[in-house]
Image (cartoon, grey):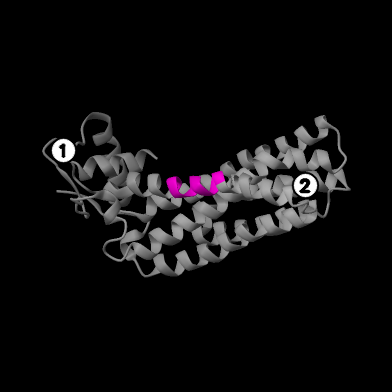
Amino acid sequence: MAARVDQFLVLKHRVTGRSRARVTRWLKLFEPGLTIDDRTTFVLAEQGHRGVPVAMLFAHGRAKFTVLLWIVNFMNLINLYFLSNWLPTLIHDAGYNTRTAVLVGTTLQVGGVIGTLLLGRFIERWGFIKVLATSFVIACIAVAAIGQTSHALVLLEIVVFVAGFCIVGGQPAVNAFAAVGYPTDLRATGIGWSLGIGRIGSVLGPIVAGMLIARNWSTPSLFLAAAVPALASCVLMLALGRTTARRSDWEMSSGTAAR
């Protein structure tokens, strides 16, 4: 995170004090023999963007990336908020007491915390696309399995944990992917709009679930329906992988240089 902040400060020519020391340290990791003194200035191989920031999310070939990213956020937050809001109620309706239903709901969030920590490590090794696409396809299976395992508490806890690991834990990873997908001065706009569109899904998810429950959908059917957005997220991540592969300027490393 500090590296991303320093990158923004270089672009804005605001590198001083501690940030200057960090930038120097980063550069010397790549070029140990580099000479940097008080007269050295730092430049970034990016240009600032003028005009309406949100319009720039669709400029210079970014439109497909932006739209796909928005839909991924929309789909994942539909699932996240559906599970967070309705899981304890549905588990209670399946015959468990209130204490057990709350514990199952807590398991979802515990899985999300652990997923947030571990998925970051996995992404460092295998990259965003492989990890997130795999995570979402596993989430699809786990969410669908929740409705099929409500009769066996131990198995239910396991699949709920896996669903939380992949869906709740996957959301911060999607946010990080948005951060590396845009040039430095568009990152805040890109992440903000992506999450804003996703929030529409967070509102619709519980509402649609409530409507389906009112229509007397069975618990297995509800979770099978909830698995669809996770599958869609997997397919969309693969499409994003093809999109970013053609955009070398969206790589995680950026051209900071000293002169």
Amino acid at circle 2? Ile
Crowd tier of the residue under label 2, counting other residues whose Cα lies within 10 Å: few below 14, some 14–19, many 20 or above? some
Estimate the x, y position of residue 26 in percent, counting from the top left.
31, 44
Q: Nearer the viewer, residue 75 or 156?
A: 75
Identity of the residue drawn at 32% across and 39% down: 5
Read off the residue under disc 1.
37
Span highlighted in magenta in the image: 195-203
Read off the residue under disc 2.
158
- How would you classify the magenta stretch by its main secondary structure? helix
- Compared across the picture, whether 132 is left or right of 241 comes to right
Estimate the x, y position of residue 112 in percent, counting from the top left.
62, 42
The answer to which quarter of the image holds residue 251 is: bottom left
Identity of the residue drawn at 49% across and 49% down: 198
Q: Secondary structure at mark 2?
A: helix
Q: Nearer the viewer, residue 85 or 141?
A: 85
- Compared across the picture, whether 8 is left or right of 77 comes to left
